[in-house]
Amino acid sequence: MFKEGINLTKISLPVCLFEPRSFLERLTTNWEYNSLLVAAAGCADPADRLRYVVAFAVSGLCRQVSFHKPFNPILGETYQAVYPNGIEVYCEQISHHPPISSWQVYEPEGKFVFYGNGNWVAGIKGNSVKGRQTGTNCVTFADGTSVEYELPGLQVKGVLWGTRVLKYSGQMVFKDVKNGLTATIDVDPQPQVGFLTGWFRAKKAVHKPDQVVGKLCRGDTVIDTCHGNWLHYFEWDKGANGGRAKRLWDIRTSSVTPAVAVGDPLPSDCRNREDVVFLKAKDQPKSQEWKLTLEERQRRDRKLRKDGGGVNEH
């Protein structure tokens, strides 16, 4: 399992490393600060709207990290839930290899739809694992404006020994093509020190872990800058609403609204999986047994689709 460079999404892991829920259910945790999207939908200024979408995406980073792994969804698996403010969420696993999850999140009055798909790619190197959720993240508002963005990479250090640490890094790019707006957010940027600057600089550049910094541009013109920490807060320097709203997210004061699973889900709902059910009941041996059974069933179904002339990887 720990062969360097191996793709961990294709490895069957023991249930002792898992949390008792599917990745589809775990996804909804990322969007628990969705009041920021409601606020975005209420903005008349496209730049303010983008400011709130960026804050929503950054706020979700701290919600989706965990030291336990969710179960890989089975092809055709679903999850339906409703947030306390009435926002509905629908998730489905649409591909087995590569594993791709798709979602649609609806505001009940039609103010916005948040949709996309995610494919987790992860590999191990030495004592650390690097992963990234690739795929589309798009928010479309009632006036037809759409904002698309991508998520940063995630690294888990101390997998085999030492202190286990989770860190995001990389860049998030947000695009509103209709209004000519872009936002570029650097997550955990490292100090830029070259040979000459390192030689002549009196003090070494201080690295602030987990910080986020970025800019909002209209065309080539920077119209605002932002800063924060993905674990604590996010704010714009000029701010939204004429400067009245600068710190758009703060983990100490912003309300978290967990989704509640619907009471009458489809038979394909991830909560019906036997391996999840038994792990939730703290029966690891039975959960492991069912996990292997479901994986073998998936491999058998995939072979039948391939032999029948279906798409090889789905």
Image (cartoon, grey):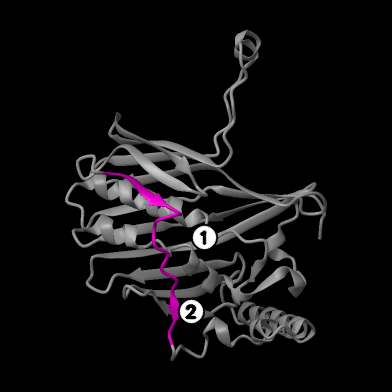
Residue 79 magenta:
no
Residue placed under numbered mark 1 in the picture: 63
What's the residue at 62%, 56% (across, down)?
Answer: 121
Q: Residue furthest top?
A: 200
| Camera sees residue 230 | yes
Q: Earlier in the sequence, mark 2 or mark 1?
A: 1
Range shown magenta: 245-262
Amino acid type of the residue tagged 2 in the rendering: Tyr
At mark 2, the secondary structure is: strand
Task: Please name which of the two marks, 2 or 1, marks the residue nearer to the observer.
Answer: 1
Magenta highlight on residue 255: yes
Secondary structure under tag 1 reads: loop
Horizontal and vertical percent for residue 261?
46, 81
Residue type marked 1: Arg
**Could you say which quadrant of the image residue 98 lies in?**
bottom right
The residue at 29%/54% (across/down) is 146
Task: Indicate left or right for 249 with 309 as reference.
Answer: left
> Residue 86 location in percent, x, y?
31, 75
Q: Which residue is under mark 2? A: 79
Pick whichever, 96 or 256, lies toward us: 256
